[in-house]
Amino acid sequence: MARKNVFDLAPEAAEAAPQPAQPKLGRPLLGLERPIRPASPLGSISQSLENINSRASRAEEIERQLAAGQTIIELDPALVDGSFVVDRLGVDAEDTTSLVAQIKEHGQQVPILVRPHPETEGRYQVAYGHRRLAAAKELGLRVRAVVRDLTDEQLVVSQGQENNSRTDLSFIERSFFGARLEDRGFPREIIMASLGVDKAALSRMIALIKRLPPELIEAVGPASSFGRLRWAELADMLDERGNRAKALKFVQEQGFLDQKSDARFQALYDLLKKASTKAERTVAEARSWAPADKSISVITKTRFKTLTVEFSNPDGKAFGAWVTSNLDSLYEAFRTSKQEN
């Protein structure tokens, strides 16, 4: 009697044999939706379902690390767009040349931070590392990057904090960046976290930016050697009659942008300082007043932004003292008359 084939399975057993589930994996951070198909166990019975599951687990771990920003990958720079809020007012050509030479010799040591583009599938948006991205493009290299799924708020906080930690932005760039964020509707708490400043400092920065024409700031550039006090002086001089139009015309003149940013600021500052000094020396108007009995003489001299009063004759000193002691009531009367008018 012939023996039955012991390797044959009964029909019922064959139907009951479970089929190994194929793991369905994707690459959402890389902009790909194709599933990963593990290699089929051809040529070796020893390759089991556990091997396939192990590979799937490793692939899933890579995806998890990418989502957490723990893995550095290389991207085509052409697929990476800039941040939706620009924080720089131009990059010095010498700095760019130096960075390109450094990356060419030693490679890109520090990765940039990007997120999947919120509007365009398959593209990315940079949080920080704009100069490294530009250098990689110039050299024709792939850029090393960390990919994180960031909200708008997380992106601008990362962008600002990276620049703060490297003292990379000038005072006016940081202030301009903060003002732009506020214009886009970001709350003050997010802007403070991005710039690393408290509420009072942020208020001063944004208030100063509102006194300066945006086109003037962009024309001058970062002006790294000048801080808040010098920019505040510049804003004060711009408030003087005729100076704003004069400044905007000056920054559009041929040759202005050919200078470095610090030199542009100094040239503009010197121009306005000279105009302000000249205006202060010019007496616009002088008037005198005296009562019928000539017991007092009052002379007022009006300069560009100031008015001086001089009291003379027998009662001049006493009247001047009385005016000084009653300034509160006199000022309230002045404000009331303005409201009525």
Image (cartoon, helix red, strand yellow):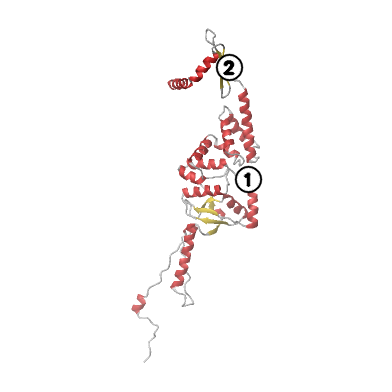
Image quadrant containing the C terminus: top left
Residue ID for mark 2? 286
In the figure, is residue 87 to the left or right of 53? right
In the figure, is residue 237 to the left or right of 334? right
Viewer-nearest residue: 309 or 256: 309
Question: Alpha carbon of mark 2 to alpha carbon of mark 1: how far?
Answer: 50 Å
Residue ID for mark 1? 92
* Nearer-N-terminus badge (2/1): 1
| Residue type, label 1 | Asp
Viewer-nearest residue: 267 or 301: 301
At which x and y percent is residue 155? Answer: 49, 49
In the figure, is residue 171 to the left or right of 119? right
Within the image, what quadrant is residue 141 found in?
bottom right
**Vertical comparison of 207 with 96: above or below:** above
| Residue type, label 2 | Ala
Q: Secondary structure at mark 1?
A: loop
Within the image, what quadrant is residue 339 found in?
top left
| Residue plotted at (52% across, 15% down) | 319
